[in-house]
Image (cartoon, rainbow, N blue to C red):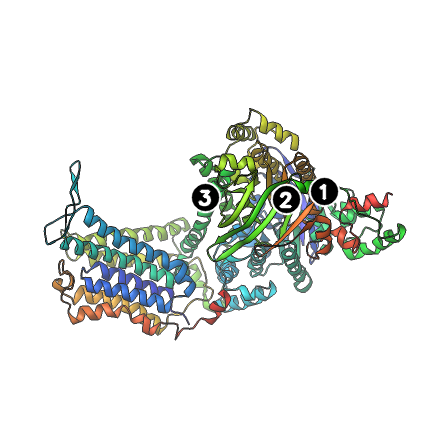
Amino acid sequence: MIVFDDVSLVHDDGRVVLDHVSTTIEQGQLTLVAGGTGSGKSTLLAMVDGLVPHFSPGVMTGEVTVDGRSTRLVRPRDLADLVGYVAQNPAHGFVTSEVESELAFSMEQRGVSPAAMRRRVEETLDLVGLADLRDRPLRSLSLGQQQRVAIGAVLTAAPQVLVLDEPTSALDPVGAEEVLAIVRRLVEDLGLTVVLAEHRLERVLHAADGVLYLPGDGSVRSGGAAELLRGTSSAPPLLRLADALGWDPAPLTVRAARHFARLVARDDGAARDLAAPLGGPREDAYDDPRLVARSVSVRYGDLEAVRSVSTELSSGEVVALMGRNGSGKSSLLWALQGSGRRDGGHVQVDGSDPAAVGPRRARDLVALVPQDVTDLFFCETVDDECRAADHDAAASDGTTRALLASMVGGIDGGTHPRDLSEGQRLALALAVVLAVPARVLLLDEPTRGLDYAAKATLVDTLRTIARGGTAVVVATHDVELAADLADRVVLMAQGEIVADGPAREMLTASTGFAPQVAKVFAPSPWFRVSDVLGSTAL
Amino acid sequence: MPVHPAAWWVWGLGVAAAATTTTHLVVLVIFVAAVLAVVASCADPTRRGSVFRTYLWVAGWTVAVRLVFRVVLPAGAGTGVLTLPEVSVGPVVLFGTVTREALIGGLTGGLQLAVVILAVGAAHTLADALGLLRHAPSALAGITTALVVAVSVLPTLGRSVLDVRQAARLRGKCPGLRRTVVPVLEGTMDRSSALAAAMESRGYGAVPVPPPASSSTASELQRPSVRPSVRRLVQPVSLLGAVGVVALATYALFDASWPGWAAPALACLAVLLCVVALRTGTTVRRTVYRAERWTVRAALVAASGVVALGLLVVAVGPRVAHPGPVLLPALSAVGLAAALLTALPVVVASPAAAVRPRREEALA
């Protein structure tokens, strides 16, 4: 169906993204494109739709053909009836303001007759499960619903190939499941060929027929998930377990892994004593509350985003704040920091309210890394940005640069902040807001677009910061990150805290927010790869 | 079946134009009441709250500001109603005697503007401007799609300014110009190129699917004999020309030194240019999803605005239309009828006839 014939892409600055790639993608298969950040996944996907080379700088050689049509010779707009492409942030690609008109857009552009259009929109509404939302303004939808609208909007042109760039990266686990279920249905029922890139492989690997793995050196390897990903930095928890415990063939689904897990359990007598787990909460930590919030509420018009939330954060603890999209996590973080909206309640950090002391003092009390970190940057180079941060914080020259170097090495000071990889950019944002060490550090959804290696670096960095006495809160949908990082998990729903407890207890008890290891070894309290390894090594 | 969006805009612009032709206080007050009644009875409740409230607020302020100006800067002679101590600021004298005539003049001027604001606001509340653009002739599809996208994207620009200013506070600084402008512009550029790519990959500007064989004959397709590059220029040039000619015609209407036939002649020219624009755009073929139909009710709604305007211009004499600074001037039967006619949509287009349960259900 899709043929890459000796394809290379060289950026204007001489960086080789793809180096003489030849591969094929079969019709009717769900192919997963895996690899670290900057390995060329998005470029590969854009080539299928012809957005590369038509819509991007750089020099492309070789030929990509889809169903015999060359994407170099045909413009993407004339491929719309063959290839449907959904970009990383679907909201940025919305053309109209309502669900139905968004679905109809591509047909209107092609002059499809009104009767045919109506029929096709109705079919698509059912296909992506949006019939009850058909009249809603796009802005009022949750991220998962928006993703489904974006998929539906390309489906109305009746393409044979669907290209999805990180369709679940911004979604909560349940929303991701829904989107993935629709994608699987399209493959099963309509015979669509789906090409999908994703960082959180644990979410999609079980649904994939084949994998294209991009190691980052410009090459592309094609094959089965197990043999390609085992031992690489992109391996999801199941494959890492399989590697460490010698499971063969490596299980790709939780269900297959349970079979091996029963063997492990039998080997070492099952319910091992895990009362003192690795990296668990320090008992003394809770004696030293850093931040005390009492009945904090945030309202936007009629919408109560945060309803009378009370909580305490202790020195040195790492808290994962979890919950569905739109459950009030971001609003709560901004309200705690003091620069966001707060319509009621009190926040005390070291005896003062960060909202009352002005931005200079507030950042010494509570530092916040926003969801879109690029909002923080306004300089042309990393070095300028660091200097400006030193100046803002009244810190001595070079503080921010040194902090950045301690987190991620090898960043060229002359790079534009927007040209950094996601992981480097997050590190720069952390360095900028932490130029003065704050009492409390809040991060809003930091792992979007981070590969496993960058996430491991983030975990190390945040653990180091917490050991220095700072209370750290991470709002995240990434259950694997929460398992690796957090001492405590706070679960929000509809603006309220519905559960709050030690990470192990919280993550193994909930079905929606359980990491892979917990699912495999339920009902044992293991939930990290290191738990299992530590245990079986005994 | 809701009323065609174009009908609401014809009605709204008709009322707005009618308000500019008279300074009769009673007529203006009836206009305000009529517009409010139509919005109250015909508009979607959620849009009434979110969209119309803003217009109502601006209209109220307009009247208030006009009145306050007449108190602060008194002008002309007349019956004094209030005397304030005068304050001289350079050559300008503030306060002093406030006359009844000045207050009535301020009220009429303010109400005229308020009716224009409310009528346009009502049209926008009853029929989204974006919805209207969708119904533009398909020959203008390129231009209308661009407009729709521009209008839809505009609110996100405001959002991103707020986001960036909030983020700047996280660095401990009050956001300056550079700290706001640079990230907002960079973000907007990113979003625009993402949008352009999305539109491209969804077939915007693609070669249309071939129409059924019966509807297009070979001769029709071969008709263009002009060079394509020239053809492409004809439409935008004639559209721009039409806009320019309309501006000239408006000027001719209000400038006494222009000959009387100038305005109608220019209007004819504008119509001619529009026809040229429509005829030259036939290479692009677009369809509209779930287009509203033009019904009898739509015709009545549009007519109520246009006829009211026509009556005020043609059938009402200047003594009634511009009665001078009197609170309750005499009103002819025709003038009263014209004013009341603008409330006709309450009868013909209220949702008692056009129930939209589907929409309300979805929003509940």
Q: What kind of element bears circle 3? A: helix
Q: Could you tell me residue B143's position as x and y percent?
A: 40, 53
Locate residue A431 relative to residue A276 in the image: left or right.
left
Q: Could you tell me residue B248's position as x and y percent?
A: 23, 51
Q: Could you tell me residue A233's position as x and y percent?
A: 73, 41
From the viewer's side, name the closer residue of A1 and A273: A273
Mark 3 Cα-neighbour bin, 10 Å: few <14, some 14–19, many ≥20: some
The image quarter in which residue A284 lies? top right
Q: Which residue is mark 1?
A: A283
Give the label on residue A213, or none. none
Q: Is residue B135 visible?
A: no
Give the foreground label among 1 and 2: 1
Q: The residue marked by circle 3 belongs to what chain? A: B
Circles 1 and 2: CB distance less than 8 Å? no
Q: CA distance from mark 3 to mark 1?
A: 44 Å
Q: The residue marked by circle 2 belongs to what chain? A: A
Q: Which residue is mark 2?
A: A447
Looking at the figure, which quarter contains the N terminus of chain A?
A: bottom right
From the viewer's side, name the closer residue of A148 and B146: A148
Q: Which residue is mark 3?
A: B161
Mark 2 Cα-neighbour bin, 10 Å: few <14, some 14–19, many ≥20: many
From the viewer's side, name the closer residue of B16 and A469: A469
Q: What kind of element bears circle 2? A: loop
Residue type, mark 3 in image? Val
